[in-house]
Image: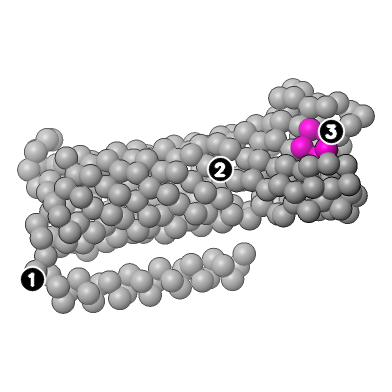
Amino acid sequence: MKNLRLSLVYFFTVFFTVLSFSVQSSAAMAIKKKGTKGVFGGGAFAAGLGIALSTAEQTGINGLIDSAKATVGSSASKLSSATEYVGYVTFKFANGYTAIQLRPTIFSQSSSGSGTDGSHEYNLNGYTIFPLARIIPLSNDLIDFYIQGGLGYGKLDGSVKNGSREAKFSGSAFGMQVGLGAEFCFVPEHCFNIEGNYRYMPIERNLVSSGTGPGNLPYGTSQAQADKELEDGNGNDVATTLSGISGLLSYTYNF
C-alpha cells in the first residue's frame, strides 16, 4: 500500500509538471472557454460524470477473509481497491480563480471465492457526498489547474457470506477530502478532468441488520447478531473504511 501511494504521488507530480510546460507553449493557440458571462454576476455552472479507482484497504474485513482462509481454505482475495461512480455540479465564480462543487459518489467493492463449505462473498456498497471548495492558481483559455478540499459524509452497507453463514451490516462516518486536478476544454462547452484525491473517512463501528445467528457465525466473527455491532474473534469492532487515494477521470459540460 505504501509503495502504491508513493507511485500515485510520483505519477501525478510528473504528470502535472509536464502539462504545465505544455500549457505555456500552447497558450497562444488555446480556445476560449465558455462561462465568463452568465448567472450570479458573471459566474457559470457546470455538471459532470466520472469514474474513479481508489485504494480503500479494508483491514477489518480482510481479517475475516484471513480467518476463512485458515479455517476452510477460502479462495476469496483481500479487499484493497474499489470503484466509484462520481457526479458533480460546480459553480465557478466570475473571478475565475475560485469555485464550489457538490460531489456525490457511489462506492462499490467486493471479493468472492469458495471454501470447503461453499461459496464465499464479501461486498461493500455505499455512497459519499462532499461539498468542495476549489482554488484555481493556474489557468488559461484551455486548461485549469486546481486544488480542492472539503468535509463530507459517507455510508457503507456490507455483507459477508461463508457458505450457510451470513451477516449484513452498515456503518457511516464524517470525513475530509483533499486533492488536485486539471480540466481540459478543447471546445467551450465540453471538457474533461483528471484528478488525484485523498479521502479520510474511517467507519469504526458497523451495526448488524441481519445474520444467521450465534451458532452459525461468519468465520472470524464473535458477534453478528441483528441490532448489535459486528465484532471479530477478539471481541473488537470490525471496522470498514471509505479512506484512500483515488484517481478520477470525468467529463464536464459547461452551461
Q: Is residue 245 above or below residue 205?
A: below
Report the front residue among 115 and 91.
115
Residue holding disc 2: 108
Residue furthest top as drawn: 227
Q: Along the horizontal axis of the image, is 49 left or right of 64?
A: left
**Residue on which the image places disc 3:** 164
Name the residue rendered at 59%, 71% in the picture.
3
Q: Tell me the amino acid under the disc marked 2.
A: Ser
Q: Could you say whether the residue bearing mark 3 is in a helix, strand or loop? A: loop
Q: Quadrant of the C terminus?
A: top left
**Could you tell me if residue 38 is visible in this image?**
yes
Residue 181: quadrant of the picture: bottom left
Asked if disc 3 and disc 2 are in contact, CB closer than 8 Å, the reply is no
Q: Nearer the viewer, residue 5 or 94?
A: 5
Where is residue 173 shown, x and y percent of the image?
Answer: 57, 37
Q: Which residues are magenta?
A: 161-166
CA gap, disc 3 and disc 1? 66 Å
The mark nearer the N terminus, 3 or 1, is 1
Which residue: 30% across, 76% down? 18
Cα–Cα gap, marks 2 and 1: 43 Å
* Mark 3: amino acid: Ser
Type of the residue with mark 1: Ala
Label 1: which residue? 28
Q: Is residue 163 magenta?
A: yes
Whichever of callouts 2 and 1 sits on the residue coming sooner in the sequence is 1
- At mark 1, the secondary structure is helix
Q: Earlier in the sequence, mark 3 or mark 2?
A: 2
Q: CA distance from mark 3 to mark 2?
A: 24 Å
